Amino acid sequence: MSTSELSPEQLVQKQSLPGAHLSTEACLAQAKQLQGKVVVVTGAGGGFGRNYSVLAASHGAKVIASDINLAAVQATVDEIVQAGGQAIATRCDTADWDSQVAMFRLAINTYSVVDVVVANAGVTEIPGWFDEKLGENEEPVKPPMATVDINLLGASYTARLAFYHLKKNPSTGLKSIVLLGSMSSFFGIPMAPMYSMSKHAMIGLFRSLYHSATPAGININIVCPWFCATGILSAPTRIAVAGLPLATVDNVVQGIFKGSSDPSFTGNILGIDAAGVLCIPYDAFIVGEGGYYRAFLNRAAYTISTVRTIKDVIAAFGDARKPSPTKMAVKTVGLGALALSAYSAAVGATDVGISGLVGRGAAAATLLVI
Ligand SMILES: NC(=O)c1ccc[n+]([C@@H]2O[C@H](COP(=O)([O-])OP(=O)(O)OC[C@H]3O[C@@H](n4cnc5c(N)ncnc54)[C@H](O)[C@@H]3O)[C@@H](O)[C@H]2O)c1
């Protein structure tokens, strides 16, 4: 039986690797630990950060909710306060060290301590790395690095300040850091080198900090979602993944919640896809046929092999708010098809179905002639 004939659940059973799927109940089991805790969340104006903040506050956490978009994070805080919870909104650009220092200072000045930090803020690949245009001296132009500035440097600033403030916290109870990786912490998304690089690096950050966190009484975990329909998905990405089973926001938030609230839970990677929350212990990070790198590739191959219809792709255009003249639309489909075909080939997912192959081939051919 080929990988693509297995359901995600069967894939998990077939892996016979250490680790386990966590139920919603298991993820929320230690919710009472967040009662009265001071929780700092970056990127809390939308997506996972917003939903996690609301959930944590509903269990009694005092949330410092920050985002580069103040209006968006104020809306998160308004929702929390209207529901009877405690939260403060603040603007913070995580790519800016001083901005993050000020965010943590606000937490200390308001609540005296920090107990939990979720380094969530992130952006998609900022286009431009592949630009062929030349600069003044007929040499390539320096590529935009904002993806790395936010997803990697910004998250490492958050982790550094989290360490400083958590170590100063005299409590012997729950102290935790949750980092946001991605399934692209394990493979390279075609056409997204800076995103893939920064999310791979988050695994390295997590694996290194774990050794320092443990003796300091700090838990550290990393949540690695597959594609999920939040504001981060660009129009071309939505089209490229149209019809594929996606991770749910609820599952991702449950993973963040587990990593942040369970005092005995540290050093884990939480891989989240359409099959739910997969907990991978630190020691299980094995490269090779019997390891998790292979397991993630198999899962991604299974997901990509899902047979999709043209209706899925057309529906995805409904979400694309930018003006989309025909040429841009066709180009987008072509690029998405090429990227997914390249990725499928890379992971050995040859069984994509006749309609999938014909569709991708036609789209790729169209791209070449426009
Ligand atoms: N949605 C997915 O498919 C997916 C998959 C894997 C990993 N992730 C990761 O999850 C995290 C959250 O993403 P999301 O899906 O909720 O996206 P989102 O776009 O819905 O939310 C991200 C939030 O971060 C904020 N932000 C962006 N740049 C910022 C900056 N410089 N400083 C502070 N805030 C900033 C945005 O304003 C936004 O509110 C990111 O790290 C992302 O890389 C997302």
Image: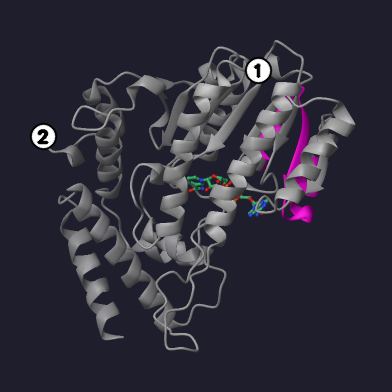
Quadrant of the image occupied by residue 49: top right
Main secondary structure found in the magenta portion: helix
Q: Residue 131 in the image: x percent, y percent?
A: 42, 76
Residue located at (33% from left, 46% from top): 187
Q: Nearer the viewer, residue 221 or 31?
A: 221
Q: Is residue 7 visible?
A: no
**Element on which disc 1 rests:** helix
- Residue bounds of the magenta highlight: 50-77
In this view, the residue farthest toward the left is: 1
Residue located at (25% from left, 81% from top): 368
**Element on which disc 2 rests:** loop
Q: Compared to 118, does 365 lie above or below?
A: below
Q: Amino acid at mark 2?
A: Met
Horizontal side of 135 relative to 67 (left or right) equals left
Quadrant of the image occupied by residue 343: bottom left
Q: Residues within 10 Å of mark 2 (few under 14, many from 20)?
A: few
Disc 2 target residue = 1
Horizontal side of 211 relative to 290 (left or right) equals right
Residue located at (65% from left, 40% from top): 158
Q: Nearer the viewer, residue 162 or 353?
A: 162
Q: Residue 147 in the image: x percent, y percent?
A: 53, 58
Q: Residue 198 in the image: x percent, y percent?
A: 47, 49
Q: Earlier in the sequence, mark 2 or mark 1?
A: 2
Q: Nearer the viewer, residue 7 or 260?
A: 260
Disc 1 target residue = 31
